[in-house]
Every structure is written in C-alpha cells, then in structure tokens.
Amino acid sequence: MKKIELLAPAKNEVYGKAAIDCGADAVYIGASRFGARYAAGNSTDDIASLVSYAHQFDAKVYVTLNTLLFDNELSEAERLAWEVWEAGADALIVQDMAFCRMNLPPIVLHASTQTANLTPERVRFLQDCGFQRVILERALSLQQIQDIRKSTEVELESFIHGAICVSYSGQCYLSHIVAGRSGNRGVCSQPCRSTYNLYDGEGNILLRNKHLLSVRDLALGTHLSELIQAGVTSLKIEGRLKDLNYLRNVVSYYDGLLNELTSSEDFVRTSQGRIIRDFIPLPERSFNRSFTPYFFDGKKRKVASFDTAKATGTIIGDVIEILGPYFVIRGEKKLNNGDGICFFNEQGDLIGTQVNRVEGERVYPRDMRSIRLGTVIYRNFDKQFSDQLSRSVSQRVLDLDLQIEFKSQGLSVMFFLPQGDCGSLFFEGNFEKAKNPDRAVETVEEQFKKSGNTSFRISKVTVLGEVAFLPISLLNAFRRQLLEYVEHYLQTRYVRMVRRGLMRTPCVKDLENLTYKANVINHLAKQFYEECGYGFIEEGVELKNRFYGIEAMRSKYCLRNELGICLKQKTNKGPGKLYLENNHNIFELQFDCNRCEMILLYRERICK
C-alpha cells in the first residue's frame, strides 16, 4: 500500500510542532545557516527538540541546507550536516552538488526544487547520483509529472499550496542582478513582485507600473488524488515565513482532504496519531494572492495579478453610500470590528486600512481617504477568523489500550497502540487485597484513563487478576511512569532511513559544456561535474561581475500568453520585440515557442 506524506513548513521549533499537531506527516526546517530562507534559521538544539516530538508520531523532520556554497563555507556546511544528523534529522534538502563530494553522515539527501527538476532526464540524473527524493518544479503539468514517474524510481515531492516562484527554481538570477541578493543564496529580494513597464521594440510603452511577473498562489486541493495516482510521495506546503495562524489553517485543511481520500483510495499516511481540532480550516481566509492551479492542468491565462503583488483577500462588495466617517457596502458578506480592508484608488494603487467599528450597515474605517462611491472593498485580514484560530486547540494524540493485571509480585501493565506496537511495564509490590473489589476496579480504571497534558488518550482499560487496594496517589504515580515509558519507547523504536551507500558520479551521455545555469561556485561542485565527464564548466552567476546577456530567468509563465498575444496563435498580431524595465534595468523578452517558455535577458542599466 502506498504511503503518502503531507509536508509542512516550519519557521522554527514552535511552528514545526504546531504543524505536526495539525496533521503534517513531516516538516522541513532551516538549519542555523545555508537555508533558502535566510530569516528562518534554527539552532541544532531546537531542531533536536522538534525531532524528539515528531518521532513519537513517526513524523519526519527534514533540514534545509539548500543554498549555493562558496569555497570558504564548505567546511561549515559539512559540520552542520553532521550536527543535524546527530540531532536526529531524517534528511537534508540540498541544492549544491558539493554535498555529493563531502564527508557526510549516512543521512538521506533530497534534491531541492532549486536543482531545476523539470524533465525525466534531470530527475534520473539526480536519482543516479544517489538522491533518494527529488522535489519537483512548481510549474510542471500533471502529464509532465507522469512522464517523470514512468522514467524514474526515486521518491517525488510536489508543491500543492503557497507562493509560486515565477522562474524555474534555481534558474532565477533576477534578484542577484538587480539587487546583489542571490535567491540561490537564500536572500532573494523578490523583484518578480515589483512593478514593471512594458515596451515594444520602438520604445513605445504598452503597460506602465504593472506587476507583470507576479503570479497568484498555488492551490491544488482538488488535484491531490491525481498527484497521488501519478506517483508523488510527498505533498508539500510552501510558507516558512508565513505566520502561525496561516500554518495551522492550511495544514489542517490539507490534512482533512487527505483523510477523506484515505477512505476511498489505496494509500495510508506515513505518520501516526489522531488529530483533535475545534475549528473548520478555510485557506481562503488566510494570506493569499488569490489561488491558481498554475499549469497543473495545462497552459492557461489569468495566472498573474498585474494590479498588485499583495494579498487582496475576499471581495466584500462595492460602496453605495458615503457619509462623514462611514460608508455602506452593497453585498451579502459583512465586515467586523478589527478587519483589515483594502481597495484600489483612482490611480490604481492598492490602499489598506482597518475597520474601527461596524454599526449595522455602517462601516467606520480608520481612514476614509480615497474611498469613493463604487469602490470595491476587499477584506484582506479576517479578525474574527484570526481570533478563532488563535484561541483554538489542535492536538495530535495516540490512542492507547491498557491491560492491567494484578499478580502476586506486583502490577503488570501492558499497552497497545493502534499501529500494532505493544509493550509492558511491571511495578513490584506486595499489595493488600481489596475489600471492595468492584470499587477497586473502578478506581484503577478511572486513574489510568487520565492522560493529562500528554500526547496520549487512553481508550480502554482492562483489569485482570485478584484486585488489590492501591492508594490513588500510587496509581497516579504508576500512570505517570507508564506514559513516560511509552513516550520513550516510541522515540527509541523509531528507525531512521539511511542513505544507500556513497553519493555516486553518473556517467553522462551526450555531454555538453556546462553553463552558469549549473550553479557551480565552489571547487567541490566543479570536481563533481568534472568526474561526470564534463569539460568546460562555466562559473556561476554569483562569481560574475558583469551580467549583460545573462538569462536572468526562464519561466513557463509567458507574458504574451497572459496578454492574449501568444505567437502560436496566428490571428494575434501583437508587437514584435518586447522589453521590461524596472528601476532603470532593461530586460529583453524572448520566447521559446517550441518549449512554450519565456526568457528574460539582461540588457543594461540606464543611468539617470
């Protein structure tokens, strides 16, 4: 039977434990350095604490060391790999091929989505290197995922929710070119979320100050079954920098969807435990730029959001009356005190403010400026839902059945877990025979059914043998020792997967010279590719001083397609050459129509 994993982001130890409590089968978390989210680093001690919590539920912890490394960082990265292995981590997520030539512990390696995993050939190459999982590019269609699965045996991980990198992951140099902050080094400045001007070849401006590269957020909740049938093992949620309520809401939502599928499809979850929650998850009420399946079910338009890169939230309605400090909205949805609202002003700028109070149909915002009759109001912060999430309880528990038997030398307690594990603990003692056996049995059952603030719920207690009288204080002490023993048992019986042998050097056929897009910026990565048989290996962009003519990004997202002027459609006679300009940086747009891809070539910076 297939095992499926719901994989959630963990900004830190607290977030990681919350994700597990909400239904994640695994979490990914940054080490103290070298993670692709610079602001989400964690100490080894915190990772060890998270591992200890996760493993009692058979949940896994993956650690990201997925930035490119300079030569002077290689020894520290190797040391960190050993530290997180000793802390109990289940795998490292890496991008730099230098890890294939390091002296590493036998920890499993996952190939980051930053390794540009687009084709069966690329995934097979990483499989032959010895990676045990490959994280797929977000822009892949279902058909492309199926094609990769047919050609490979390695575990496949696919994103199902969250922000989308518009460029092919690992192949974006836009931030480094315009801001000196490399996305492959974990410090992306997100220039794809900025505004751009679009020009034709004659210098005519076609669009001004639009978010032409900012795509909506991914949501594949309705496609989980297709992904599983296509052979994906791990379903991944993006968002290590999102807030805790976002994490709890989104993880709970996908946990519920997967649980519904397990009843009708041939797969099981990889972790153990039952989730107790007291709220209904609604991902549309957490941060989002509006949702899209992107290109999962084929190339389509309206995947971008030209007007804003921010979260607009849900449309509430349009303003039909303004009087002094309040306005009235036409629409079925209602605002509440403390809600965050936003709207576009007459210049097309997104303006945000807060609702101070609501009296009937009257809405009193903090700032009335720019609100006009007909203004469409969005709610981008749902105060009521956020408060509900903050107050709510979500907990993962393991159900235990106990068999308690009184013996001549003491008390034997056996425990049984749903997955079939069992064990026992014996408490020695010469106990006095109970004068009221029925009442004594009730007392034993009552005290052993209490689980307090632990991860266990006692479902059933069976009492056998000639019942003795035990003080409640002693029964409570026995119960506490038992639950501590079970927790220790679960952690010690957990067996980590280990890497299968040394990382290998695949023999590459049809060799070509490696360009800067191989992201080689240290001698170990260069050595690895040389051993594969490559001749000339160009240095990575992070080592270059000049960027003219460099492919700043390549994307399945196509601006021509989004604007309805696709070159494949003969009837569309749009402009010829196209250029993007942002902060005086000029990029020429090129279109590889055979592959249906758009390319941004860096041309120059205009000095003004």
Image: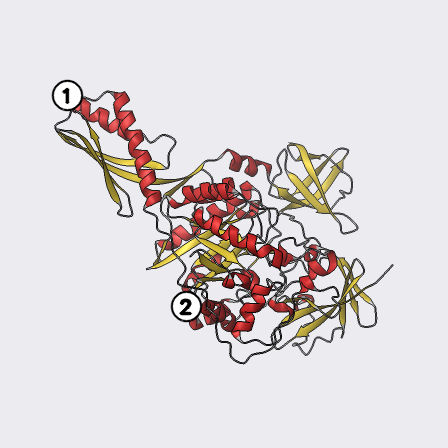
Quadrant containing the C terminus in the rendered view: bottom right
Depth order, front residue of 106/393:
106
Q: Quadrant of residue 580?
A: bottom right
Residue 293 at x, y percent in the picture: 55, 60
Query: In which quadrant of the rendered image does the N terminus lie?
Result: bottom left
Q: Please rate how many residues cluster around mark 1, counting C-alpha atoms within 10 Å: few if below 14, some from 14 to 19, many from 20.
A: some
Residue 96: horizontal and vertical position, in percent?
56, 61
Element type where label 1 sits in the image: loop
In what element is the residue under mark 2? loop
Whole-percent x and y of residue 88? 42, 47
For the residue pair 575 and 459, the one nearer the viewer reads as: 459
Q: Which residue is labeled 2 in the image? A: 153
Q: Quadrant of residue 546?
A: bottom right
Q: Are marks 2 and 1 in contact (CB under 8 Å)?
A: no
104 horizontally vs 324: left or right: left
Instruction: Say which mark, if any, is on residue 22.
Output: none
Q: Please state which amino acid type lies under the numbered disc 1.
A: Ala
User: Which residue is tagged 1?
Assistant: 434
Residue name at image x 47 percent, y 68 percent: 129
Please name the amino acid that badge 2 sits on: Glu
Q: Position of residue 85 (x, y in %)?
A: 45, 50
Q: Earlier in the sequence, mark 2 or mark 1?
A: 2
